[in-house]
Amino acid sequence: MEHTATEIAAAVQRGTLTARTATEQALHRIEQTQPAFNAWQVIRHDAALAEADDVDARADRGSLPLAGVPIAIKDNIAVAGEPMRDGSLATIATPQSSDHEIVRRLRAAGAVIVGLTRVPELCVWGATDSAFGVTRNPWNPERTPGGSSGGSAAAVSSGAVPIAHGNDGMGSIRIPAACCGLVGLKPGLGVVPVGEAQTSWGGMSENGPLATTVADAALMFSVMADNPGAAQLIEPSALRIAVSTSAPGPATPVAHAWAEAARRSADLLRAVHVVRSATPRYPATLMSTTALALWTAGVAADAHACTDISQLERRNRVHVRIGDVVYRRGLSHPKGREVWRRRALDFFTDTDVLITPALAQPPIKSRRWSERGWLTSLLANARYAPFAAPWNMVGWPAMTVPAGLDNHGQPVCVQLVGRPGSERTLLGLAAQLEQLQPWRRTP
């Protein structure tokens, strides 16, 4: 992929590139990369070209922020005329009758929906495999692109499209971004619509962008949030930054390359910002009890909207049964969530941004995890990706930013976390890191 979303939109606005040409190029890249990475659930060849022609015919094309930009949508929100399978044979294949609000906003901004991307069943896990196949990481096909927005991350990392939609209930934007060396933003609670087409896992899930540059992420976020000003990056100064390499859960080792990425990124910022080492007081049961209760209850609510729960993967039937018990016993609103919220607020009284590793370990293997059982999947996910979920529980904005490559040539990334309403601060800080340590956009 030669051009960013920002560059494509500017060229279409000027008339030096047509939306149709940009779409044809994306469809060609999809055709080339799909056999290797299996990022796509639906490829909208004819429909996308028709949409591109509509963009080229629009009188207001010169003012459309995403004019002609080919974009992927994760297959768990509604795209009119396409099924929404959510990675499961337990869902119906009937085309959706209308667009999710996010899709409507992206289309109105001139984006062209070229396809829908793969997810693990019901978006439960941090690796993307389902009855529809295994999705692979363009940096290393033996490793997962993460989950649940793994298809979107693979689509962007493979160079097929410059930006993609994802959503994040326990890290499902930031984990794939970290696996694939991308920028991924989870907005704070209420900033971007969730909508009726998708349950929100107790208010934890948010829609956001995946991109190869901070500018592209900011542009897409500005459209999703209906906040045009957010596309303009603001360079922050004199932030109070804390850096921590300690995982939220006990007995969770953090690989050297990922810990070093956080420390190195923080050191780069010392010339402009006040940086200290400090770790939030994560409750001891945050990941083992509080997160598990919210996660299982949220998935159970999703599952009961399926047409035939018996068609779910065995590990997910276990997950749903646990979630049903959690709900019946009144445990789906755990007190630990409020304890953690108070501690997070206390930590951020003298901190503007927290930097952590984005992952604790390199991406896990790309395989049919669904054949290996619930407990095996749980332990694999918890061990490699513990840093994201705490910030879903409190509804705060957080994002993944690339931070170079490890000794094996695989991406390493950091997570930036801020208080509610700090999305533009995080994007501005991410842009500073992008200038200080530029990254390869694709493998």
Image: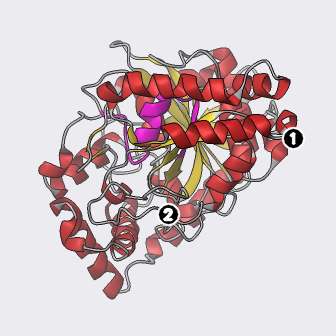
Q: CA distance from mark 2 to mark 1?
A: 28 Å
Return the mark for residue 60. Answer: 1
Q: Secondary structure at mark 1?
A: loop
In the displayed structure image, the side of residue 27 where residue 13 appears, left or right: right
Image location of residue 387, percent across then percent down: 44, 45
Q: Is residue 345 magenta?
A: no
Pointer 2: residues within 10 angstroms few (<14), some, or many (20+)?
some
Q: How many marks?
A: 2
The answer to which image quadrant residue 58 occupies is top right
Q: Considering only vertical position in the picture, is 356 above or below 413?
A: below
Residue 124, position as x, y percentages in the image: 34, 57
Question: For this view, does 351 lie left or right of residue 395?
Answer: right
Quarter of the image with the N terminus in it: top right
Q: Residue at x 43, y 61 (%)?
A: 283
Q: For residue 54, which quarter of the picture?
A: top right
Q: Is residue 325 above or below residue 217?
A: below
Mark 1: amino acid = Asp
Q: Which residues are magenta?
A: 144-165
The residue shown at (69%, 17%) is 435
Question: Mark 2 = which residue?
Answer: 96
Quick check: can you spot residue 66?
A: no
Q: Nearer the viewer, residue 129 or 55?
A: 55
